[in-house]
Image (cartoon, coloured by chain):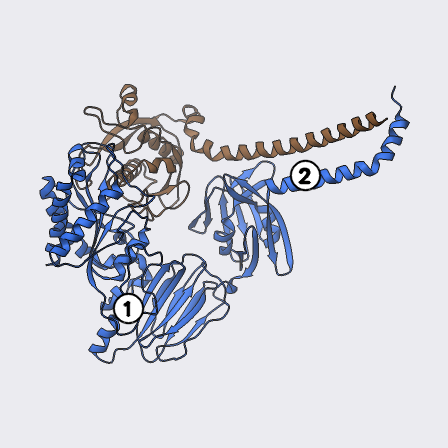
Amino acid sequence: MFYPERSLSILMKMRNRIFKALLIMLVTGFCLSVLFAQQLVIRDGSRQTSMTARVLEGKSYYRIIELASALQFRIEEKGNSLEIIGDRGSLTVIQERPLVRSGSQYILLSAPAVKLRSTGWWVPVDFLEKGLPNILSRKLVNTGGNTYRIESLNQNLVRVETVDYPDHVSVVFRASKQVSPRIREFNDFIEIRFDKYIVDLDDIENPSTIDVVSGITFDPNDGLGTFRVSKGNRYGRYREYVLSNPPRVVIDFFEKPQDRQQEERIAGSDAAVPDASISEDIPGAAPGVPVGSPPREEVVVIDPGHGGIDSGLEASGGAVEKNLTLALARLVEQQLQARGIKARITRNRDVYLTPDQRSSVANFYSTRAFVSLHIGGSPSSETQGPVVYVDNSYENQAESPADDTGNPDDALMIPWDQGQKPWLGKSRELAGSLQGYLNRLFLSENRSLEIPISLLEPINAPAVLIETGFLTNEVDREFLVTAGYQEEMAKLIAEGIAAFLR
Amino acid sequence: MKEKRLIIFGILLIFIAVVFAYYLIMQERERHMVLQEPDSSAEDLETTDLKQQSEGEQTVQLFFYNPGKFPADPDFLLPEERIIYQISDPTLMARQVMQELFRGPGQDAASRAETQEGITSAGRTPSAFPSGTRLRQLFILSDGTAVVDLYGSTVNNIEGAFHELLAIQSVTRSLVINFEEINQVRFLVEGKEQETLAGHVSISHPFRLE
């Protein structure tokens, strides 16, 4: 029999235990839900807003409606797109596309925006840093994990240091991530614009003397992250380096040369002899180089393609591109030295180098020629013979404001990724020479090709990439893996380089 | 008495556990739904009834590799005609072109089956793309740029500068020739901008016909 009054009295007696049990379950449930959903915290001064982030396809997504109330922007839904209106402009988020439209410009996100039937619009994490700064006068700065701090734009700046050297002043802009600022020279100052890549504006360290650089200023109100380095009365020229480890931009300001002899001394003052082959921090143009050291070595740089975790092409017989290119590079180096030409190779063992590390080696030396060795692959076994490639990226790009001067010193002032621009003609010559010599060995009639090649873009010297035959072709494979042919190939490459240098 | 208490306590526990489990399952289901969304939109050629939408048929030209040739040769790529459904939305048309291009050369179904491996059989042209290649996403921007998004698994099978160039030119030519709305092609891999397609050729700028 069931007696309701009895059950009630039992329940009354047990209420303490039931409450305890419920409490434990609630706490466990809460902990579990925290595990499943990440919490986003946005701090605005002392005010703190929390919202739940959802992880979809490994990316954290935030709900726009919650962001809107925390960051004070308006949203208007229009079909399959959503308009986000901030105090500085508006953005359109497009459903299922990793795109945000800002006027006529498109900003790519790491993942598509999604609209859920139940909870509305969600955007991937990088929308906070890529999209919102375009329309808000404030910016979200990640302060670790899922915590963001709202800052006004002018607070977000690069840290600036200056170092005085006897013959030049180095201004170093240290950033928290890789930067590619726009650098332009004006009559009285040099402008360095960082756009959205901005960190702390703690204090700008001005140089101790004002002869070459009279001061560094930052205008917090333009919202663009623009520094101005004012020229002193003895300013002569500047030279810039965008370095990656750690991310920083170094700009060296040189004095006006008193006479020709002094000019030569300045030009040679960056020299150092690095063992660049495996260095993590590329020699680039590190400040702190002793004054009066000899001019930079004139060398030919040979770059064995791939290496380490990046094996490149693999043939069925066990031949691997990274090993073949290294063996060939060593042979080419020997052959060049036998002809009295100084040569360096970018890697001397099986190690992975980034493209920037490779091109930095070329840009460190006074490089006479840069040759990257690779092996070709084709979906057809009929494709055969060596092909020499030249980088023509610059030809396909719109002119940027930094390259308008027509000054003979241009080669010293061009942005990192445009190093190859003035060398296209010379690179073509080098390619022609190498293609001709290699065709002799393969009895081929291949022509060199001009395509955008990322590795060659920054190289401030004649530079080519060779695919020394196709591993997918039987005849070529024989050439590529046989020691005798490799030596012959190395001789022809060395001869091709020597003929170009003559 | 004690037993009854235990039973009530047990029922309560089970009830709460069921509610919590239901909540988790619903969360997971919604998450799955979203995960499938980008996929289904990439595959909308299969899922959309193109026949119903179509306003007829249209012949398009696809460009495949001419074995042994190089980009400097005028006959580096050979045209091949295919018939696709004519639809007012150029994006859906362009996706059909990409799908046909990924199927590889060979006009009829029989030769298609033979070239599925992507390997040259006697006298047949090979495909620049590995077998089973699917389009991750394609959209056309108002400035005439077609954005072609490829899977990482697709580009992993493209090795060497020559092969990358072949893939880029094959796609660019096939899209630009067939659509007035497209004048250049931009490549993404896994939905992201990449410096190179597969290690050599820079894709940081769009490609046009030369």
Which chain is blue in the rendering? A
Residue A294 image offset from top left, x and y in percent = 23, 70
Question: Camera-side residue: A345 or A233?
Answer: A345
Question: Does residue A397 appear left or right of residue B2 in this picture?
Answer: left
The dot on residue A188 is: none
Pointer 2 residue: A29
Q: Is residue A389 visible?
A: no
Residue A97, given in percent of the width and then of the height, sits at 46, 41
- Between discs 2 and 1, the one toward the N terminus: 2
Asked which secondary structure carries label 2, the reply is helix
Chain B image colour? brown
Q: Amino acid at mark 1?
A: Asp
> Residue B207 at what x, y percent from top left?
30, 45
Q: Give percent across and percent down for residue A153.
A: 51, 62
Identify residue for label 1.
Answer: A270
User: Where is residue B156, by image quadrant?
Assistant: top left
Q: Residue at x 33, y 63 (%)?
A: A241
